[in-house]
Amino acid sequence: EIGSDIVFPDQEDLQIQGVTSDSIGSLSSSISVRDAMESSTSLSTTATSELHASLSTSRNKRTPFLSKETRKTIHQVTSIALPSLGGMLLDPVMSLIDTACVGQVSTTALAAMAPCTSIFQFAFFAFFFLSAATTNLVAGNPPEGATVVTVDEYGEKKKVMDWKEAAKRVDFNERVVSSASLLAVVLGSMVTMSLIRFSDPLLKLAGIPATNAALLNAARPYLLIRAMGIPFVFLATVLQGSSLGRGDAWRPLKIFGAAGVVNLVGDVWLTLFKGWGATGAATATVAAQIGAAIYYIITSTRLDKSVEESSKPLRDVALVWRGLPTKSMVKTFMTVAVALFSRSIGLMLAYSMLTRTAALSGTMALAAHQVTLQVWWLMSFLPEPMSVAAQTLITRDMKDGPDRVPKLIKTLFGMSGVLGIAAAAATCIILRAPGVASALVADVSVQKLMAGLVPFAVLSQSYCPLATLSDGICIGLGSFAHLPSIMVGSFLTTAAGLAVVASRGLGVVGVWGCMNVFIASRIMGHVVLSTKLRQYVKKAFGRSKHVDQVLVPEGVAP
């Protein structure tokens, strides 16, 4: 009704009032043009405002220091590397505790431990291939990765477990662990009997002069007692390798952490309070090693052995008797083991040769070398888990996601660099701090000799992770046949350097100069011989060219 009161003039009335149809058309055109211009101006203003707001937001938005993918990779690495550090520190920590306790009692006993430690380190690393091969083989056959793609009634694709394939992988992993455990017990027993039978010749070969009967008599009991724990150590490292292959690094950390506490308490009680000296230290160490292995065996045999439970992520491999190893299993195992065994032999021959040359400078120099080597050895294990993570994760990704490998390698090198600097700084602090040095050895003369070795120990510690990580990456890539060649080359280079040290009387300082030669030559060996490693490093650190573009709203000039 309101609209009915409005009267619109018709054409005739407008003509009467002097408004023609032409003027009406002209007026309408003017209004349309004005409206269009106002609309265009409004759109331009809005678009410009949106552009400024977009640019302002882009400038104010901070790019995160690490991408989401990098943070995820770091989390995967640390989830394996951090817990595995505890397991790897078992032998070095126990040896360092022995060294610290004995160093408070007798300088002669401390010097006598140096060749013994070299022998045990040689045995540990010579047969560490058992653990490394177990890790490599188990990590390459994850039961949870046995999936197939199916299409449901709606046409959507989804992954489901292939339980037949999962059962095969579970069986393979159990056979690997069973065979490796049997080899660990057999080989460990053979090493124990060899050390008992040839104790004196081995101690002389490790650096004790044949004329120094006092040093030989002090070293013999420690060697014989520690030898009894070798089969248990080998078996525990195999089970640790199984855990790491399945990505479960917390379990060995808990077991070996408890063993370290037992060793510490036993060392302090038997060595310092009971006065047993080096014999007490060896007894406490063996007790801790046997306890760790027995607990690992019991808990591994009690695991649920069903395929469903064994196929769960991070679920450890059950320890079951699968009979004697088959020919195919032995062949599969030895393919990995031979190269790693040769590498370990070369590694420990070099360390033993360093100790033997240090022994030529006398008891004080040998004691200083023993303490410095134990501290260096312990701190070198700080970045060592990066190598373990490389073996586990790269082996897994080479099978299920090879495109992730370059990014993983780049992250591993970055983390190893940081940890190498941290290990070098820790080595410097421990050996330089008067309070810490006196806690390791009471003799002031030995402490002064140690101070002269610090620069060489710190320098070698800083880039040692590059060598160990390169080894781990090559193992993960399945390209490790050249590792023995690298070790032979670095061993011969170091031997030549030590010959110069001995002939010119450069003493223990020259020995630690050759430690740097040994590690540097290993790195150069990878640069020259590790073809596959070089290819992946180039992919990891290669930069793709790209131009950042700012999206400009359509219709607006940039």
Image (spheres, rainbow, N blue to C red):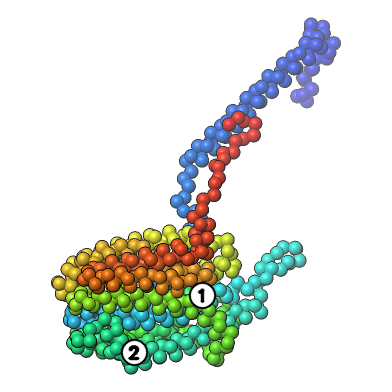
The residues bearing labels 2 and 1 have C-alpha atoms spaced at a distance of: 30 Å
Figure quadrant of residue 88: bottom left
Locate the C terminus and report the quarter of the image it occupies: top right
The mark tally for this picture is: 2
Identify which residue is drawn at 73% across, 66% down. Answer: 151
Choose top left, top right, bottom left or bottom right for residue 495: bottom left
The percent position of residue 176, horizontal first and vertical second, equals 53, 83
* Position of residue 531 in the picture relative to residue 161 (left or right): left
Q: Nearer the viewer, mark 2 or mark 1?
A: 2
Relative to 179, does residue 383 appear above or below in the rendering?
A: above
Q: Which quarter of the rendering shows the N terminus?
A: top right
Residue 494 place in picture, x, y as percent: 34, 70
Q: Name the residue nearer the viewer: 31 or 124.
A: 124
Question: Outermost residue toward the left?
Answer: 444
The mark that comes first in sequence, 2 or 1, is: 1
For residue 136, the mark is 1
Label 1 SS: helix
Q: Residue at x 36, y 77 (%)?
A: 348
Q: Identify the amino acid type marked 2.
A: Leu
Q: Nearer the viewer, residue 377 or 157?
A: 377
Amino acid of disc 1: Asn
Task: Kindly identify which numbered label has been placed on residue 195.
Answer: 2
Residue 133 position in % (x across, y down): 49, 78
Q: Secondary structure at mark 2?
A: helix
Q: Residue at x 78, y 15 (%)?
A: 25
